[in-house]
Amino acid sequence: MNKDIIKLTNLVKDYNTLNKKIEVLKKINYSFDKGKFYAIKGHSGSGKSTLVKILGLMDNPTSGKYLLFNNEVSKLSDKLSSYYRMKHIGFIFQEYNLNPYLNAIENVIVPMLFNAEISKKERKEKAKELLKKVGLENRLTHFPSDLSGGEQQRVAIARSLANSPDILIADEPTGNLDKANEKIIFKLLKEMSNEGKCVIVVSHSDEVNLYSDICLELDNGKLKEVNHGK
């Protein structure tokens, strides 16, 4: 059975600026599988953020194909694209992006508000379970200002899991954290991949190599495997 949930074929992304075409992504061919932790590296300006936005259905390629669960993304309606993004993709950001006026449980509940498949009654219980999963069962009613950076990122991971996505996309998730918290976050993401999720992490940290199954490099618009993680 094919495990590919993302398949990129000759994926290209160009930008036109002042009559000049800038090639950011150049005919990328790659497939991402369930149950794997992928680390993507590359220097600043290499196109990592552009690739992440396309993978997360927040931007469209200029040409080429992006198949998500064997569905060509370019042919999805706006409504279906939004549904896929809500139901199947969880996002984790460097800046956490938590609502400062909501406590930990409430922040985790937010994505569920857009999911008709989760009842109002189930939301709070599921949020509690997810926060326990990331080791924050004693911080349920704490607000972001009362949490450390590492704790805030763990709330963000719990939030990314709210709708039970198949794919987790993390863009520099440990960029604001110390080494101890960095290890905690990468370990949690590794656990998610071991549970069958496709985990894609953009990171400058060499620490990610210890947790990734496959390390990729984006260089001059090309994506290639550079080594396998441990």
Image (spheres, rainbow, N blue to C red):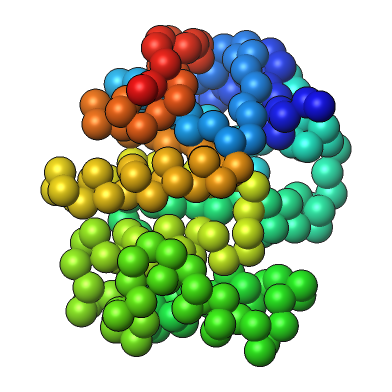
Please state the horizontal and vertical placement of residue 122, each as a whole percent of the image: 65, 83
Please state the horizontal and vertical placement of residue 226, each as a whole percent of the image: 40, 10
Residue 222 to residue 188: above or below: above
Question: Seen in the image, is 163 located left or right of residue 148?
Answer: right
Question: Seen in the image, is 182 located left or right of residue 77?
Answer: left
Q: Residue at image x 63%, y 63%?
A: 163
Q: Residue at image x 40%, y 12%?
A: 227
Please state the horizontal and vertical placement of residue 61, each as a whole percent of the image: 65, 28
Please state the horizontal and vertical placement of residue 137, each as a whole percent of the image: 36, 77
Question: Seen in the image, is 159 located left or right of residue 137?
Answer: right
Quarter of the rendering containing residue 142: bottom left
Residue 169 to residue 34: above or below: below
All told, the count of numbered labels is 0
Is residue 219 visible in this depiction of the protein? no
Foreground pick, 5 / 29: 5
Quarter of the rendering containing residue 125: bottom right
Foreground pick, 126 / 30: 126
Q: Residue at image x 60%, y 81%?
A: 123
Quarter of the rendering containing residue 148: bottom left
The quarter of the image holding the C terminus is: top left
Q: Residue at image x 24%, y 59%?
A: 150
Is residue 150 visible in this depiction of the protein? yes
The quarter of the image holding the N terminus is: top right
